[in-house]
Amino acid sequence: MTFEGLQRRARDEWQALSESAVPLIQVGTATCGRSAGASAVVDALREALQREATPALIMEVGCIGLCFAEPLVTIRKPGRPAVCYGHVNPERATQLVSEYLLRDNPLADWALGTVGEGRIEGIPELFETPVLRPQVRRILRNCGFIDPTNILHYVARGGYTGLVRALGMARGQIIDEIRRAGLRGRGGAGFPTWRKWQFCLEAPGEPKYVVCNADEGDPGAFMNRSLLESDPHSVLEGLLIDGYTVGAREGYIYCRAEYPLALERLHNALAQMREQGLVGENILGSGFSFDIHIKEGAGAFVCGEETALLASIEGRRGMPRPRPPFPATSGLWGKPTVINNVETLASVSLILQKGAEWFAEYGSEKSKGTKTFALVGKVKRAGLIEVPLGITLRDIVYGIGGGILGDKRFKAVQTGGPSGGCLPEALLDSPVDYESLTTAGSIMGSGGMVVMDEDTCMVDVARYFLDFTQKESCGECVPCRLGTKQMMDILTDITEGKGREGDVELLQEVALAVKKGSLCGLGQTAPNPVLTTIRYFRDEYEAHEQGRCPSKVCKALIRYRIVADKCKGCQICLRACPVGAISGERRQVHTIDVGKCIRCGVCLEVCPARFGAVECVTGQ
Amino acid sequence: MKTLRLTIDGVTVTAREGMSVLEAALEAGIYIPHLCHHPDLKPVGVCRLCLVEIAGRGMTISCKTPVEEGMVVKTESPDIELARRVAVELLIVNHHADCLSCAKDGACKLQEIARYVGIEEERLQRLRRTTRSLPVDSSNPFFLRDPNRCVLCGICVRTCEEIVGASAIDYAFRGYATVISTLGNRPIVQSRCESCGECVARCPVGALVPRQERNPAREVRSVCAYCGVGCGLYLGVRGNQVVRVRGAAESPVNRGRLCVKGRYGHGYIGHPERLTTPLIKRDGRFVEASWDEALDLVAARLAGYRGDQFAALTSARCTNEENYLLQKFTRAVMGTHNIDHCARL
Amino acid sequence: MHDRIDAILSSYGRDRANLIPILQSVQAELGYLSEEAMLRIADYLGVPESQVYGVASFYAQFRFTPTGRNRIMVCRGTACHVRGAPRILDEIQQVLNIREGETTSDMEYTLETVACIGCCALSPCMMINREVYAKLTPTKVREVFSKGGQEQ
């Protein structure tokens, strides 16, 4: 079939769906939706529809990014805008069928907003709500709106026109287009994408390879997972354009094994591409032949580092090697190789579909376009967001995120995962772009953004990250293997009240040596969480040295106790205590045996809020 | 080969194209600390100790940086000093602490580097010392493997792969848990290890040490007496006893390499049961005899045989001249082509 | 067991690039990687067995001892950490009386931690087999295991 033929079929199917005479019910069943219970919601909807004998289409879609409100269900009745409902459980699902589908009561209280033309009384427009208004949905344009297992949906919304356009262009022209768009690598370091491509194109040696890095390992980040689960073709199209431009015949997608659904969606998408002649020999009759292999990671964070990733594809230990030579000249099996991140490739598709100028409309001078972030942690509206680069952290945390959970006090926002840093309140008004974040001691990273509040201990956070990096260090080079372990040991001592005088200075010294001496990016950036927490939260380190954990997190420095005049002697805590550390007769004031107590905090959790008789204390 | 000129610490140095900055410096007599570099092996750049600063490029490792014409190299700077000092200190606090009981004491690269960097006890005291203690592999009769003294430079792994071709060992696990291991961390004798000792000879620290070896008083250049290859070696001698054998790097035959027999199989030289005179069987028992007596007896007995009644076996351990003579004797004197040899004789 | 391994091996080319996929398939079949299996893989691919072990031990996914019928994976992602993951792990260890990396004596559960399962917005969370349990508290953990988490 020609591409025009495919487009016609896609448009017809999309139109039929949009003008469907029966209601269309979309349920977000990406991993986050499923973990919130979306599968049970789908079952409940099916059952209710059958019981009421009412016709409706159920379509499973990806993630729209409003994770805080999962599971999400969107219902579009003919002639009405679609209504997006949040926090749907099986009971609510059944009610939506009986109330909205049968009785035309849109249950406005449960609705988050409407999508599409027209309004419904009492329900705001979804994209005008505070969580979405500051966002610019480009990369995520299809997420949550199309069926990710159906290539026609992607094509109907402009998909693969970027590839078709690229196939009619000279390689130099494509690279120039990417250059004018100002696209920089979305994996973290922000290297100009066009330059990587140019190096590879000019490098001697055949064959050449292109690789999509989908080994999203930063704890606290899931942008790539969502995109692959919700709109896999947008990434695959970018990989094809990448391959065509640098003169490769083969491409790899290296996706981590912890993302089973993303892998499933990729395999499915690839099979569909094959059916449509979008991958394989002589793609769309252009003479360009290209094949894609999907490689499943095996659980190693360091494989996000590009030379380690290549070693892993080759069937070796994922150990990075010194650069130069860079992969663009000597990569996979020693051949010129371009490695691009998932979001970078999705941006490439968009640039070729819509043009460089369109892409560069948003962003700051040196950081063009939009960027997705996983906004998580102690924030009210956690989720997947897409914002123009240059937006301030405050707009993200307080605007989109709606502020801190329980209206507690903001303490820090962590960007860039284990390679990034913790930025304090004073930096909330700095713009989010590659340069500003680096100046602040953090990095843009792949897009994890973890919000921390007054209950988060920054020394514990530093220890957490170093525990992570020392476990994930490949162990090859001395500074990283021993330096991260050393920093973790020192931080463990500090959080256990066993810190020694001069430990903070020692940490800084070791951190600097690891940063300067390590072989790869993992080691060179691993000290960032330590250095930024010392830089911005030194008072917390000092408090720990004096035996206090101000956020009451570090177990060795806290105690639970029962406030005598609040305790009603109800025995709830006594029964819940897993180690039998609480004693006391009914209606008598209870006491906690500090020696037995393992500081699990269950007593505080179960003590009825109206009593509030258990408290956590630190110091003395 | 093209020669290039570069400047190291202000000294103009000549190097050949393709050399690394580290090699060029060492050849010119300029020391740069290094642990994972070995002249016989490909560089990997993992110890991160051979740091230098190159004008226009900043700090980098010298073992993986090829020399270039006009390059300006500095081997000292505050950044190099910090990164290297901390790395060495970390190696030391994660290393077995008792140097005197170590067979490598005095010949240890880590000691050499520590002396160069200058270790201060107060600085070491601040660091957290390892509490880990891993079992020593003493399964091999010729050498010990002690992971507690290992610095994970990978020289043994690369030797076994690049030089020996056995790959009996590799890195296993990762991060701080990384060890050099056989499959399933089995004892080394249960692996493909040929006990050639090439790794032991190259180990820069006390992680791989020979079991029965003492430092010799002097060395004697010789040729291995085992097989026909004729590997050059040095017999290390104390008094009149051979206490160590090492390959002669300058020998074009083996370029310093030896096999298990050549390296470790020298016990027979001073063995009390070694034959030192010919033996002739008289009345059912062997008695010592002189060479003249023995040769006369053999000649007298051979006179009774000719042609295919006779066969000779020679050995690859003999010299070419000796083998030539025996085949000549077999064919011309005894009148038969029944001659063969075996390398193990 | 040899037949099962050989059947897997024959579906792959004798190419080192297939080492990790083969290890994954063999583990999926046997539940873990035995030394025997690794020797056979090494032999098939012509890769030294020390290197097969080197690769297998590098990646967190591979195990060298049999695991329980149900795999618990506690997320140690950042979002989970700041929202109480350490307490969740403590609680599971307490309830099942095993440490991270261990298997219960009845072979019912193996407890592991994973870098991040990408459900950060619903933290803290864990996976039992392929099922994700979100927004956990120590009390919820007790409920899950008192009901027998694997059946849900």
Image (tube, rainbow, N blue to C red):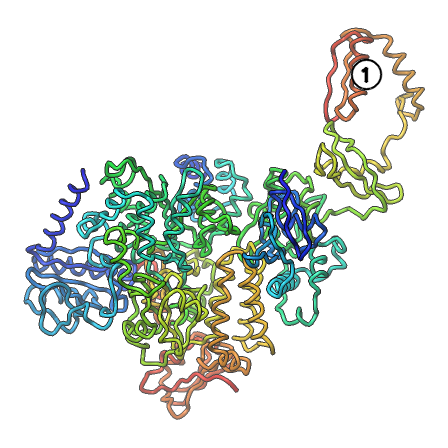
Q: Nearer the viewer, residue B7 or B295?
A: B7
Tell me the quarter of the image containing the N terminus of chain A.
Answer: top left
Residue A564, given in percent of the width and then of the height, sits at: 41, 91
Q: Is residue A157 left or right of residue A182?
A: left
The structure residue drawn at horizontal position 89% and vertical position 44%, both measured from the top left corner, is B239
Q: How many marks?
A: 1
The structure residue drawn at horizontal position 13% and vertical position 49%, both measured from the top left corner, is A11
Find disc 1 in the rendering and name its residue.
B325
Q: Residue furthest bottom?
A: A565
- Look at label 1 and name its amino acid: Leu
User: Looking at the rendering, which quadrant does residue A356 occupy?
Assistant: bottom left
Query: Pointer 1 indicates a residue of which chain?
Result: B
Q: Nearer the viewer, residue A585 or B158?
A: B158
Neighbours of disc 1 within 10 Å: few (<14), some (14-19), many (20+): few
Residue B323, given in percent of the width and then of the height, sits at: 78, 19
Residue A328, given in percent of the width and then of the height, sits at: 44, 47
Position above or below: C9 against A581: above
Q: Of helix, strand and loop, which one carries label 1?
A: helix
Residue A39 seen in the figure: no
Q: Nearer the viewer, residue C47 or B280?
A: C47
Position above or below: B295 against A90: above
User: Looking at the rendering, which quadrant does residue A4 occupy?
Assistant: top left
Residue A324, given in percent of the width and then of the height, sits at: 51, 50
